[in-house]
Every structure is written in structure tokens, then in C-alpha cells.
């Protein structure tokens, strides 16, 4: 059994933080299929992990591709999010480029997205919920994987080639609110 199948079967927890609720956009099957084909080519020795104890790991490959709309919510009921997004519409998301977000201890390979609708929804949630962002500019993206320093570079070009995200787009009509206990609420957009 190759490491990728072992990784999926072990269901390592990835990038989870039980301290916050959040709002995200799940990507459609066509994007998940591309994501899967790219991540299967990644070598385990290039990935960055943090041991959380037991069988729980954070980082590594993002096994549930999505776009974070708003992170850091300190409530578990979706009411405030539902109220903020009442009457809002969905829209289109275009995958624009593959980028590397460099961090102190690791690098993150992402598919950068462009969407006026996502920016509008993010800004509305930020204002209505009065939540400051850690980063001054919202950069919608789909995380591909977390790499040891310097190792994401060789995968950036691969994600542009035959196994590509480049210039894919999709429409969306709902977002997901996920509370601190992983309970999900789908929010339909008019």
C-alpha cells in the first residue's frame, strides 16, 4: 500500500482547531478530482507535519479541499452568520494561479482563487460579526499541502501542467458554517 492510501485510511486530522467556528465554501467534484490527482504525486518526505498526539496530525496534505470564507468565530450557532448572509447571492470562483505562502517553519502550496462574490461575502461577515482578520488582505485559496521549507517549489510547476488547477472555475450557491464541535450547517445563498 502506498503512503497516500495509508494517509487517507488513517484519517489524520488536518488543520483542525476546535477553538473556533468558521465559514467555508466546499469545492465541487471537478476541483476535488484535480486536487486528488495532484496530491497523489506528492512525496511524503516533502510534507510538513505537527504531531498532535496519538493518531492526530495537523498539516500535511489538505484532504478536504475548500475555500475559507471566515475563520475565528467564537460561537457555535449559525444564527449570526445566517443573519449576515441573508439576501446575499453566490457567484463564480476562478482558480487564478498556484502560489506558495511562506511561513517561518513551513511552506504552503495553494491554488489562488479570484471571486468578487467571495470577497463581498468575506467583507460582509467581517463587518457584521466584528471580527478582525490576522491578515490585512483576504486571499481566497484552496490549500493543496504543507511542505517542509523549500520543498513546495518543485510541486508548483506540477500543479500547472497536466495535473492542473489552472483556469478552472465554478459557481457556488451555498456556504458551510462549521461550529467548534464540527457540526455543519449549509447556508443557501439566494
Image (cartoon, grey):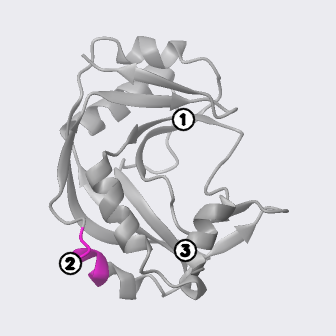
| Residue linked to disc 1 | 22
Q: Position of residue 162 (x, y in %)?
A: 20, 78
| Residue linked to disc 3 | 4
Q: Is residue 188 above or below residue 143?
A: above
Viewer-closest of 30 and 111 = 30
Gap between marks 1 and 2 measured at Cα: 33 Å
Magenta-drawn segment: 157-164
Residue at image x 71%, y 41%? Answer: 18
Number of numbered markers: 3
Verify whether residue 50 appears in magenta. no
| 3 and 1 marks in contact (CB < 8 Å) | no
Residue at image x 55%, y 74%? Answer: 4
Q: Is residue 151 above or below residue 67?
A: below
| 1 and 2 marks in contact (CB < 8 Å) | no
Find numbered disc 3 in the image and state the secondary structure of the residue it sits on. Answer: helix
Q: Position of residue 120 (x, y in %)?
A: 27, 32
Viewer-closest of 69 and 177 = 177
Left or right: residue 151 versus residue 1 is left
When asked about the image quadrant of residue 24, the answer is top left
Callout 3: few (<14), some (14-19), or many (20+) C-alpha neighbours within 10 Å? some
| Residue linked to disc 2 | 162
| 2 and 3 marks in contact (CB < 8 Å) | no
Q: Is residue 158 above or below residue 118?
A: below
Gap between marks 3 and 1 measured at Cα: 28 Å
Q: Nearer the viewer, mark 3 or mark 1?
A: 3
Q: Position of residue 69 (x, y in %)?
A: 41, 39
Amino acid at each position: 500500500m502506498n503512503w497516500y492510501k495509508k494517509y487517507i485510511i488513517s484519517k489524520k486530522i488536518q488543520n483542525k482547531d476546535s477553538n473556533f467556528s468558521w465559514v467555508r465554501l466546499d469545492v465541487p467534484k471537478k476541483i476535488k478530482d484535480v486536487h486528488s490527482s495532484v496530491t497523489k504525486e506528492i512525496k511524503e518526505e516533502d510534507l510538513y507535519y505537527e504531531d498532535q498526539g496519538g493518531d492526530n496530525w495537523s498539516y500535511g496534505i489538505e484532504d478536504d479541499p475548500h475555500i475559507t470564507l471566515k475563520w475565528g468565530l467564537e460561537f457555535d450557532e449559525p444564527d449570526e452568520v445566517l443573519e449576515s448572509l441573508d439576501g446575499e447571492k453566490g457567484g463564480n470562483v476562478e482558480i487564478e494561479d498556484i502560489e506558495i505562502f511562506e511561513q517561518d517553519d513551513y511552506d504552503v502550496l495553494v491554488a489562488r482563487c479570484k471571486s468578487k462574490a467571495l470577497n463581498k461575502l468575506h467583507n460582509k461577515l467581517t463587518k457584521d460579526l466584528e471580527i478582525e482578520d490576522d491578515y490585512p488582505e483576504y486571499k481566497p485559496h484552496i490549500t493543496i499541502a504543507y511542505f517542509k521549507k523549500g520543498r513546495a517549489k518543485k510541486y508548483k510547476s506540477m500543479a500547472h501542467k497536466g495535473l492542473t488547477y489552472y483556469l478552472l472555475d465554478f459557481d457556488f450557491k451555498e456556504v458551510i458554517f462549521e461550529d467548534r464541535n464540527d457540526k455543519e450547517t449549509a447556508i443557501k445563498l439566494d
